[in-house]
Amino acid sequence: MKIRIEWSYLVLKTKQSFFMKSEFMSVAHALMLHDDLEKTGRLKSIDFYDEQDTTWTKKELLKFLKQFETEPHDVKAYIDGGFEKETKNSGVGLAIYYKQNHKNWRLRFNDTLELLEDNNEAEYAALYLLLRQLEELGVHHQTIQVYSDSMVVVNQASGEWPCYEEHYLAWLERIDQLTAKLGLTINYELIDRSLNKEADQLATQALVGTKIEATIEKQA
């Protein structure tokens, strides 16, 4: 999670107060800046805001920082969706990498869906199921990195392209709602299919009936 600070600062000579606003920074740096400003004795008021413009108190930020190492963080996820025109069956695959309790973890998950309309919709379903998995893991109020080889999903979900297809819009609405609920900021990155082999394989395995859900510790 990134935090920005807004504060009012009193200039002693003129008795005037000035409003100032910082760039986004880590929670730890935001708390350090707060303490430095407080030591001057000229801090009139201060407010903390996250990337969703939600306000936080210092007490809440300290609690968040204390819990941070015990909760999943530094999340990177690879997603993929596959679609069979003949059966209209879809397979989705997720490979989620994260840190927790000073260890590195990988979660692999796939699933099968029915009655989707095309491959891009399967890619959207993969993105939504990723968020559902992150919700189960307890990932919230942080920035996550999502890698996909779908140009349509990456550009539409990030807001770079408009979306006019109704069946995509329905997924986008669900994705936006869940993203907001979890307080997440998603950085999307379009990657070559050759770099998405793990998620692609999971989606393919789902289409042939091989279901996978496994979490293992990874060496740094």
Image (cartoon, rainbow, N blue to C red):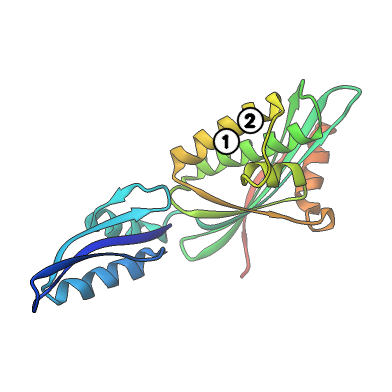
Q: Quadrant of the C terminus?
A: bottom right
Of residues 166 and 194, the one nearer the viewer is 166
In the rendered image, the vertical position of residue 137 relative to residue 59, given as above or below: above
Q: Is residue 67 left or right of residue 75?
A: left
Mark 2, secondary structure of its residue: helix
Q: Residues within 10 Å of mark 1 (few under 14, many from 20)?
A: many
- Graded by Cα atoms within 10 Å as few (under 14), some (14 to 19) or many (20 or more), the crowding at tag 2 reads some
Kindly indicate the quadrant of the structure image that contains residue 4. bottom left
Q: In the rendering, which numbered label is found on residue 175?
A: 1
Give me the disc on residue 69: none
Measured along the vertical axis of the image, is residue 195 above or below residue 95? Answer: below
Q: Which amino acid, mark 1?
A: Ile
Give how far across and how far down residue 183 sits, in percent. 44, 45
Q: Position of residue 123 (x, y in %)?
A: 73, 38
User: Residue beneath label 2, please?
Assistant: 171
In the image, taking residue 101 as reference, residue 110 lies left or right, namely: right
Residue 176, percent across and down? 54, 37
Q: Which residue is located at x 35 percent, y 66 percent?
A: 22
- Taking the spot 51% from the left edge, 45% from the top edge, the residue there is 137
